[in-house]
Amino acid sequence: MPFSERPAFPPGVVLFSLGSVSYECLMDLGPGHHGERLLLARQRTPEEVLGDVILKVLPLPLLTEESRRARGRLEDEVRLAAHLDHPHIARVHGVHEVKGALYVVTECVSGRSLETLINLADLRGRCFSESFVLHVGTSVASALSHAHRRHDARGVPLGIVHRAIDPTRIRVSWSGRVKLTDFGLARSCLPGRRITSLPRARGDVFYASPEVLLGGREDARSDLFMLGLTLLELATGKHLLDAGSLGRRQLWARVPEQDRARVKHAIARVKQEWRHPDPEELVTRAASFTPEDVEAAAATLSAPLRHVLHTLLRREPSGRYAAALDAELDLRQRLRELGDYGGSCAVREIREALMEAGERLGEEGPPPEHGFSQDDITTRP
């Protein structure tokens, strides 16, 4: 890796300037997983502070094949971002090559990731409200609907699939706005796409769809399955692909005889591609879970939300929503039924959860509303 684990950029240093705007390092967030370094930086002019951004930094020259792949991935992300303009998608502002480094400038989303919020719910022993879950789900489904339906300048569909929907890549800001981040691993038909269009470049294996784990073809409905896994975990604390008390023998008994050779091949492939030490339980669960398993996991939720989760979490893509817009409409309808719920309500719930979890741990309460948390900022595939 070009960077060590130790901070490489001290706070206060001016990293580079573009015209009258300088970029000052506020916090070194550590190395990414492809050779990048992540920095929290402040944009300022001699007259005023313009705001904070996240920088993905890659040192130049590129001396290894790994660093060349990292550059290709970052440039792919910037190229695709030019086609994404949505209030629930974190913006990528551009790429700049200055002072012996490549800098990708991205939006800094304050607040907390869903990963942190799920952990907070576990700490306090209580999940977030159904309205909060619907607020998040509606926003992400809307973002996916936008991305999935994008066309190029000639009107040709771009075929964007995010491929990395998970709790670390969804953040709720201190204004209550939900943001989907990190399209760096997306697949698309955009001309010139290179690194992240490779079949093996995917997100967290624990949030992968059954077709991806089993070597099938992925499409926009794979994103919807990943959204379903994330919403189920946020609403209940349960992960559908966690086998729970089922042993390996019981899991294999649920896999049809004619599918077992395919599943064994998939286990070997996941172990190699994701470097997962023992994916047998995960893959066999993906190959064998049923609607009854979804129902058991979502049993405490309302019938309308259970319906949405059942439709998102079908093992076969053909059984899921045909488009993210359909999921968004169902989620939005249920949110309307529950009454007025907006960003301020979401922020109130987050602050209450931070306070309760802090009390359990004997710590102080939540930080100021406009503070930045580096929780789960990631560039990992």
Image (cartoon, rainbow, N blue to C red):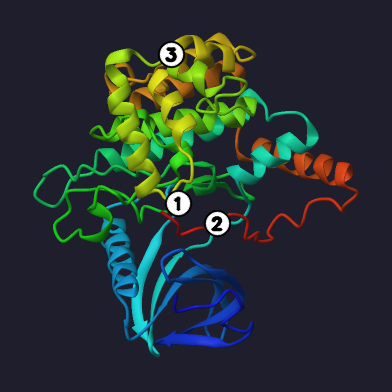
- Mark 2, residue position: 109
Q: Mark 1 touching mark 2, by CB under 8 A?
A: yes
Q: Is residue 280 left or right of residue 257?
A: right
Taking depth in this image into account, of 273 and 104 the one nearest to the observer is 273
Say which of 66 and 87 sits in front.
66
Cα separation between marks 3 and 2:
43 Å
Mark 3 lies on a secondary structure that is loop
Residue at point 36% right, 52% down? 183
Residue type at the position of mark 3: Arg
Name the residue: 76% across, 57% down.
368
**Secondary structure found at label 1:** loop
Foreground pick, 92 / 253: 253
Q: Which mark is residue 181?
A: 1
Q: What's the CA distance linking mark 3 and mark 1?
A: 36 Å
Q: Nearer the viewer, mark 1 or mark 2?
A: 1
> What residue is pinned by disc 3?
254
Of residues 11 and 274, which is closer to you in this image?
274
| 229, above or below 308, in the image | below
**Kind of residue sitting beneath label 1:** Thr
- Counting the numbered discs, the total is 3
Name the image quarter holding the C terminus: bottom left
N-term-proximal mark, 3 vs 2: 2
Q: Earlier in the sequence, mark 3 or mark 1?
A: 1
Q: Is residue 122 left or right of residue 46?
A: right
